[in-house]
Image (tube, rainbow, N blue to C red):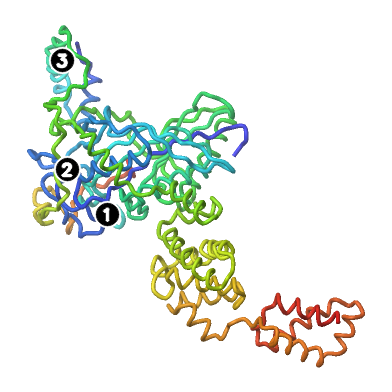
Amino acid sequence: MKLTKEQVLHVARLASLSLTDDEEEHFAGELSGILDYVETLNRLELPPPGIHVLEQSEEPTLLDPDTPRPSIRPEEALSNAPDHSGAFFRVPRILEEGR
Amino acid sequence: MSTEYEMVVGLEVHSQLLTRTKLFCRCENRFGAPPNSLTCPVCLGHPGVLPVLNEEAVRLGIRLGLALECSIHHRSVFDRKHYFYPDLPKGYQISQFTYPLLTGGLLTVRSGEGTREVRIHRIHMEEDAGKNMHAGIRDASHVDLNRSGVPLLEIVSEPDIRTPEEAVDYLKKLRQILRSIGVSDGNMEEGSFRCDANVSLRPRGGSVFGTKVEIKNMNSFRFVHKALLFECDRQAQILDRGERVVSETRLFDSSTGRTLPMRSKEEALDYRYFPEPDLPPILLDPAWIEEERARLPELPQERVSRLSREFGIREEDAEALVLEEDLSRYFEEASEAIQEFAGKGGWPVEQGTLRLVNFLLSEVLREWNRKGAGILVGPLSAREVSHLVSMVVEEQISLNQAKDVYAVCVESLKSPREVVAEKNLFQESGDEALGGWIAEVMAENPGEVQSYREGKERVFGFLVGQVMKKSAGKANPQKVNRMLKEALSR
């Protein structure tokens, strides 16, 4: 299955990546190769989707009791962020409201 | 709205859950903490962390399912929903897509004089995002991740709603249920109850749906009503011009009462859902569901029926009381006191209950809206207020006096008995006292008495006024009327 440059661009936009022209070409080929490889699965008789990677048993799921544990300090939370302002993460201005 | 169109509305509600901790980590779920003080590597979306599902969040989901008569699925699955936004540090939200916890269900709402059954399409669990702030910041936005990972239930209705009033009633009833079963505090200002609407129009009586528009940012019942009315008008005008409604997301602007298109990405969002590989499917023990069923408290609709049956009040009144749980509990307590006062005073209970309901739904409700639950306790406890009401029934004071007394009580936090005594308000209904005043007034105004007897009935009001004046306003006016008429006709 051959991916078009438009499809590569669409995926890039969804992933928030900017690609050079060379990269577009390159990934169109590379991603097509990966898809072809996965296509092999289509030759197999497989059960309908719905099986989960972690489907293990019939036992009810173990759940965590709702008991608070200490959070980390705000300084720690912010320490890996590229930018912050006071106790807030600072990000490029968001123009649109909502999603 | 033009009558040739019918409005079709479906609502999506996001409700934060009353758990102590977040959905997938044990950071506290609490509103109003200092920014970024309730976070950890899980809810900050750091690499390599694993989500651990909160038991209480699942329990609350089951409870809502029971209350709305949904199918509660013994197996449900979390999925990743991908999008990029600064309040979503992982780059995906853990939600449920293909196999939600709950499907189906029903909520009955008021529709004109009757009712309408609004079907629930599905209810799924998901995590909330953080909070972005823009106001007063130049060239940047700020992000607080305290809310990141807070458990939500997203409640999606079928497009069964037909008017703004039905939409508002649906939301009120849903919020009331969430609160009564302890699933959410339903606080709209703090964002624990948020609502989006899908709105379309179609020719009245048609069966095909029109193009729908999604409306966001309606953070009060009043705004929902306004936004739907506006949107309906807007779409009707487009259709009247023979044009097509564009499928889009619009924001409600409360300052203008209009909806405006959201500046949005040109390409359609592609969330690339896939099953969350870090969480196994939720398998529920059916015994747990039965346990929760047995523990479910009385639901609002059940309480409406019970109140109107037990106390013989109208369904509308019961419904109005039950809308606010505090008030309906207050009513029940007050009714019991009324029964006691009726027994002592030898008057029919129903008379007191009727007066009580009216008093609660006017005076008390108004003050409660203004001042909060503080006015339902202490000197204004249910028992004290029923005492005030029984004074009206026993004609010791007039209804208007009772209203004034109540207003003074609310301001001064004194009990009605105290205020009635202080103001020396007790209405005089004794034959002797009233008869005395009436005799005096007739003796002092022979001219007027003469005129009345000659058929000039208009002087009657003047004479009543004179009696009231003599009594310093305390005479029971109905009784004065009656006795004065008798005296004048002798």
Q: Chain of mark 2?
A: B
Of all chains, the one bearing label 3 is: A
Q: Which residue is mark 3?
A: A35
Q: Position of residue B298 (x, y in %)?
A: 38, 49
CA separation, marks 3 and 2? 33 Å
Question: Where is mark 2, residue-wise?
Answer: B24
Type of amino acid under label 3: Leu
Left or right: B156 in relation to B29: right
Chain hosting mark 1: B
Rounded to the nearest angstrom, the CA distance separating label 1 from label 3 is 45 Å
Earlier residue among tags 1 and 2: 2
Q: Residue B234: x and y, percent? A: 53, 38
Q: Amino acid at mark 2?
A: Phe
Does dot 1 land on a helix, a strand or a loop?
loop
Q: Residues within 10 Å of mark 2 (few under 14, many from 20)?
A: many
Dividing the picture into quadrants, the one containing residue B203 is top right
Q: Which residue is mark 1?
A: B138
